[in-house]
Image (cartoon, rainbow, N blue to C red):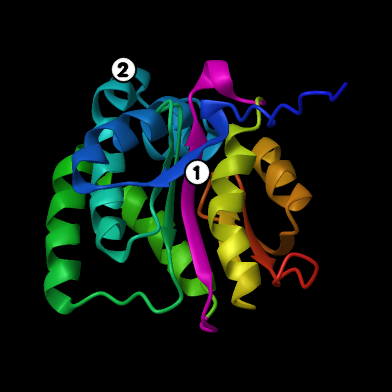
Amino acid sequence: MTRNTLAPVVSLHHLVRRTTYTDLTLTANVLAAAFHDDPVVSWLMPDESRRRADLPAMMRVFAARFQPHGENCLNETGTGAALWLPPEATFTPEDDARFETALVSAAGDDIERAGELMAVMEEAHPTDPHHYLMLLGVVPDQQGTGVGSALLRAVLDIADAADEPAYLEATSPRNRALYERHGFEVTRELRCGDCPPLWAMWRDPDPVRS
């Protein structure tokens, strides 16, 4: 008698796909929910009611800026999202002008804080080619279920296969710990006025996975 062999069941929560332009609103809403209580975002938009109302628009601005480069990700159940840039990504002056106009509109009264924070991040940003993870978030009731790891692996596996590094800025001890589990190491603590700290984190490619 032979024994039937069952294929492993893969949860839809952990299946990740690249986004399209039709996913911009969903991506923005997922990230806004994920980062609503984040310490850095709470500093950036200190008024809780305005943060709830305006954060999705700001997240959409960043998702739209990264979308043409093809590495933004969602999981199949729409509970986690990540904004990535590949090593070869560049922006034209027209891209930058559109982004700045949209960011000013989305940030409203918080644009000065946003500008200060982005200047600190830009000053610390490495110049060597790398995959850049700007934002990764999972809706609160799905955090800790492996969705964040799946979103990371969707691009880190590609980076490892191509022998390419990755970089990000962690905005809380919790997400810093997630990134450390996936091979990122803190290279620098970033400070912007009285904003809670961010951590610049770099990851060399993993030869075991390449």
Tell me residue 196's x, y (percent): 58, 43
Q: Earlier in the sequence, mark 1 or mark 2?
A: 2
Residue positioned 38% across, 30% down in the render: 30
* Residue in the foreground of this view, choosing between 39 and 178: 178
From the viewer's perspective, tell me whether residue 93 is left or right of residue 37: left
Is 109 situated left or right of 192 in this image? left
Outermost residue, bottom side = 128
| Vertical arrangement, residue 27 with respect to residue 67, above or below | above
Residue 125: x and y in percent read: 51, 72
- Local secondary structure at mark 1: strand
In the picture as drawn, the residue positioned furthest to the front comes out as 1
**Is residue 90 visible to the viewer in this orientation of the structure?**
yes
In front of the other: label 1 or label 2? Answer: 1
Amino acid bearing label 2: Ser
| Residue 165 at least partly seen | no
Comparing 79 with 116, the one in front is: 79
On the image, numbered disc 1 is attached to which residue?
Answer: 136
Residue 157 vs 94, above or below: the answer is above
Magenta segment, which residues?
Answer: 127-144
> Residue beneath label 2, please?
49
Mark 2: give few (<14), some (14-19) or many (20+) Cα within 10 Å.
few
Is 118 on the left-hand or right-hand side of 95?
A: right
Q: Number of labelled discs?
A: 2
- The three-letter amino acid code for the residue at tag 1 is Leu
* For residue 166, above or below residue 135: below
Picture residue at 51% right of the left edge, 68% below the top: 131
129 within the magenta span: yes
